[in-house]
Image (tube, rainbow, N blue to C red):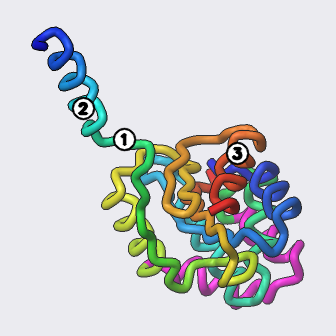
């Protein structure tokens, strides 16, 4: 899972003060996690990562191959290039790198956040994040 | 004297217990998707699974 609307709100309210970095942690026992991660990075290759990121969160769990291709078309991507990318698992090494990082941190839940290195596990209300971010901004 | 010393020792010992909540983890951004300025005072890493 990913905390779409809450993170969006944080990025709007703290515009210019917060940097968001996404790491993929596709759960190995879910059928479409890995494919969706590939799709997000295939869209990045065509300059539309965030558009695809938002769409995947919005349409989840409809993430099977046919849906991913439909989303690529919806976003105006080069579908042929996108298809070749996801079918060939072009970003496997990058996703594996993130997975290895997540495992080294002993993560067991998504989303998991690190705010200036402080761990927050699971979806939380905006106010929870606000408290931590405000503390960090005061430092 | 001993009755004063023991509680003081106990308080001192409690102060030495590490506070795990304050631990910070250093994560490399590498080439991962990023939003917001690189020099922002706060960086949030989000580990996600779209499904």
Quarter of the picture holding the C terminus of chain A: bottom right
Residue at left offset 20%, top offset 14%: B4
Instruction: Give the class, few, some or many, for how many residues have Cα within 10 Å of label 3's Cα (few <14, many ≥20).
Output: few
Q: Residues within 10 Å of mark 1 (few under 14, many from 20)?
A: few
On screen, residue B15 above or below A97: above
Of residues B32 and A55, the one nearer the viewer is B32
Q: CA distance from mark 2 to mark 1?
A: 14 Å
Q: Which residue is mark 1?
A: B19
- Residue drawn where x is 54% and y is 67% of the image: A23
Task: Give whichever of discs 2 and 1 has the lower sequence position.
Answer: 2
- x and y percentages locating residue B34 in the rendered image: 67, 77
Q: Chain of mark 3?
A: A
In the picture, measured across the screen, residue A125 lies left or right of residue A33, that is right
Kind of element beneath mark 1: loop
Question: At x 73% / y 76%, what residue is drawn?
Answer: B35
Q: Are marks 3 and 2 on the same chain?
A: no
Q: Which residues are magenta?
A: A66-92
In the picture, measured across the screen, residue A71 lies left or right of residue A110, that is: right
């Amino acid at each position: 899972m990913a905390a779409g609307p809450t993170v969006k709100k944080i990025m709007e309210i703290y515009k210019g003060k917060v940097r968001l970095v996404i790491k993929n942690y596709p759960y190995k026992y879910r059928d479409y996690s890995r494919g969706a991660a590939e799709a997000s990075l295939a869209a990045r290759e065509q300059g539309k990562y965030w558009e695809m990121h938002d769409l995947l969160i919005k349409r989840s769990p409809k993430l099977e191959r046919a849906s991913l291709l439909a989303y690529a078309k919806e976003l105006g991507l080069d579908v042929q290039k996108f298809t070749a990318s996801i079918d060939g698992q072009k970003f496997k090494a990058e996703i594996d790198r993130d997975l290895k990082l997540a495992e080294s941190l002993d993560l067991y839940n998504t989303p998991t956040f690190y705010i200036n290195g402080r761990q927050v596990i699971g979806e939380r209300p905006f106010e929870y994040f606000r408290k931590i971010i405000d503390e960090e901004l005061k430092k | 004297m001993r009755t004063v010393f023991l509680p003081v020792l106990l308080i001192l010992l409690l102060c030495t217990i590490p506070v795990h909540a304050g631990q910070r983890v250093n994560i490399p951004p590498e080439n991962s998707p990023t939003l917001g300025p690189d020099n922002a005072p706060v960086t949030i890493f989000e580990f996600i699974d779209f499904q």
